[in-house]
Amino acid sequence: MIGPDHRPPVWPKPEPGALAGIRICDFTGQLAGAGATKILAQLGAEVIRIEDPVQQGRWDILRGTQPFVGEHRGIEAGGSFNNHNAGKLGITLNLRDDRAKDLLRELVAASDAVTDNFAAGVMERLGFGYEALRRIKSDIVYVSNCGFGADGPYASFRSWGPIAQAVSGLTFQSGLPDQPPAGWGYSFMNHTGAYYMAIAILMALYHRRRTGEGQWVDLACTEAAGTLHGAASLDFTVNGRPARRSSMPNSNRSPSPAMAPHGIFACDGDDEWVAIAVRDDEDWQRFADVVGEPWTGDKRWQRLAGRLAHEDELERFVGGWTANRSKHAVGHQLVEAEIPAAPVLRPSERIDGDARTSDWGMWVTVPHSEVGDTRVEGLPVRLSETDWAIGRGAACLGEDNRYVLGDVLGRSDDEIAELAAEGVI
């Protein structure tokens, strides 16, 4: 944690972004919330994260957990935390102390929005639920994001990414035929929740600009996840077909729209794969020309209906053709023939070995007070006039106390030092 006498480096400030002038009082953590405010910070908003100086980072368990940044360890070295919070400011407030609550009230009054992804009811217990926030600033935008939303029969339930995934239905409909549900691995529910939360913050701020009215936006990650399987829900509602049935689901095939071959096929090397999508009969003819093996002349493959009727056998042939070839060579050959295909890349290949990523500038290196230069994600968008930027790494505990309490709230250095000595910050 940054001590009261520590003056953090002066970071180079990015050019004003699209959200310059917007200030967010931020209680988010992990990814479902922190991912949302990271987007806003990269687009120019001043995002001020609030943390507890007593619990030393326990509000966000990613702070000091692996993967770590290089050889560093401890609450400042969590790789995921540093990625999700790059570009934000960070202060500490011990909200067990009334003086810290007074400081928070001043910060809310100077902010445009308050954001959190605590469990339902936590902000109320801290004394800063929506009604309390409105009394501080009548037009405040408050956006809460929790697993099951702030009200309803499941509001008191606790959630984590895989839990939201399971409740949403996504876990059930994933996997291989006649095998248990596999789930989606890493929690994409957190990503989805973060994207919806970022949009919700922007829409509420836009509404406030038009009308002068603040509002409370309530978001449930389980419902956000539910939006990802609308086709399966519709198929059951309209056609009575459940996602899990004989031969389904097959996570290596997509039945809608119907294509064949359409999946992931093993290539030469250890755990090397290529993705292929033959969309129609014209694609098939081009595919057959590239492959150039006798089996491609089988009349069963000439029309989509035949390829679908004998898909297992067709996939064995395709897999036999790709097995002794480089995934990059196969992808290149098929793309040259105007057939959708691509090598299946590992994350490390995307970051360091793929020009599509490096040319786009998706990964940037930023300075961090404790761990030095560290690489973090950018945004997969480009704005011609107000592009995104990241000027610094994630804040250490209390790193920006002096700026926020001094420059924003008007406290003197002596007052800040006294607050730190007495455990208020």
Image (cartoon, rainbow, N blue to C red):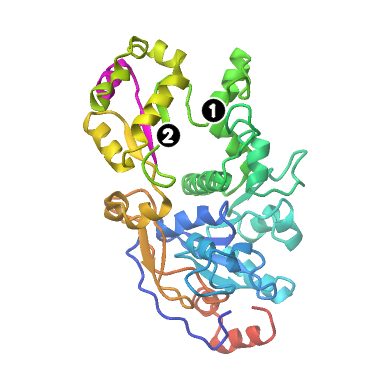
Q: CA distance from mark 2 to mark 1?
A: 12 Å
* Residue 226 percent location from the top left of the image: 60, 34
Q: Which residues are magenta?
A: 273-287
Which amino acid, mark 2? Ile
Query: Which corner quadrant holds the N terminus?
Result: bottom right
Query: Is 66 situated above or below 357?
Result: below
Dot 2 falls on a residue whose secondary structure is strand
Using the rendered view, name the quadrant where residue 153 is placed: top right
Q: Is residue 60 visible?
A: no
Mark number, residue 412:
none
Residue at the image point whose x is 24% and y is 27% from the top: 290
Q: Nearer the viewer, residue 308 or 195?
A: 308
Q: Nearer the viewer, residue 396 or 265?
A: 265
Residue at the image point whose x is 28% and y is 28% from the top: 339
Quick one: label 1, few (<14), some, or many (20+) residues within 10 Å? some
Query: Is 61 situated above or below 206?
Result: below
Residue at the image point whose x is 73% and y is 49% from the top: 158
* Residue 318 percent location from the top left of the image: 37, 27
**Mark 2 or 1, nearer chain start:** 1
* Residue 65 percent location from the top left of the image: 60, 66
Dot 1 falls on a residue whose secondary structure is loop
Residue bearing mark 1 = 250
> Across the whole image, how many numbered discs are drawn on residues?
2
Query: Is 144 situated above or below 74?
Result: above
Instruction: Give yes or no for residue 155 being in the magenta stretch.
Output: no
Residue bearing mark 2 = 264
Which amino acid, mark 1? Asn
Q: Nearer the viewer, residue 325 or 31?
A: 325
